[in-house]
Amino acid sequence: LSAPLVVTSCNPGHLQLHETFDRVLCDVRCSNDGGIRTRPPVKNAEPQELQIQKLKAALCHLGKHGKLVYSTTSLDPRENEEVVAAVLAEGHLKLVKLPWASKFAPGLGAGMECCVRMMPKEGMEELGGAFLAVFERQGVES
């Protein structure tokens, strides 16, 4: 069985956990360009390599049948699809298509159709833009 719940804002690579989890959220520090209408951009966003490292470290805590959500409040492909592609290229993982994803724009580029790009909308500016991708291990049925 997976551990019940751990909430942390630290780098998952620094966690001294030996448990795995059914659900993992990896919301990395990003440029926040998706929320620029309502919030200032983040001046010290993490570089792409650190975002990739954090995602890989978070995936180490994913249980055999678990799902991991990678999310940002960025619309920059360097912080989104490129990070996802780098992790997928190592194998053993696949993206999960969400049943409600068709209400939003898909990810950019080949193989990113399961990703979700939430674009800012007229009348809902306070929500801004966001990106998410859901991972699970290869060979596991959704």
Image (tube, rainbow, N blue to C red):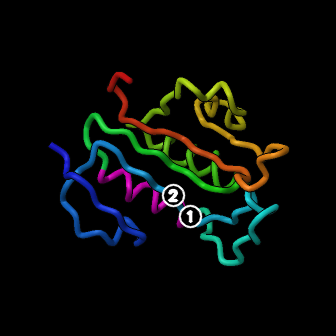
Asked if the stretch drawn in magenta spans residue 109, the answer is no
Query: In this view, which residue lies farthest toward the right?
Result: 122
Q: Amino acid at mark 1?
A: Glu
The residue positioned 72% from the left and 33% from the top of the image is 105
Check disc 1 and report its element: helix, strand or loop. Answer: helix
- Residue to which mark 1 is pinned: 49
Against 94, is 52 above or below?
below
The residue positioned 53% from the left and 62% from the top of the image is 28
The residue positioned 60% from the left and 36% from the top of the image is 115
Quadrant that contains the N terminus: top left
Q: Is residue 118 left or right of residue 7?
A: right
The residues colored magenta run: 50-61
Q: Amino acid at mark 2?
A: Asp
The residue positioned 51% from the left and 49% from the top of the image is 70
Quadrant that contains the C terminus: top left
Q: Is residue 97 left or right of residue 19?
A: right
Q: Position of residue 60 (x, y in %)?
A: 31, 53
Q: Position of residue 49 (x, y in %)?
A: 56, 64
Observer-nearest residue: 36 or 62? 36
- Residue to which mark 2 is pinned: 27
Against 29, is 23 above or below?
above
Check disc 2 and report its element: helix, strand or loop. Answer: strand
Query: Magenta-highlighted stretch: main secondary structure?
Result: helix
Query: In this view, which residue lies farthest toward the left?
Result: 1
Against 71, is 99 above or below?
above
Residue 114 numbered mark, or none: none
Asked if the stretch drawn in magenta spans residue 53, the answer is yes
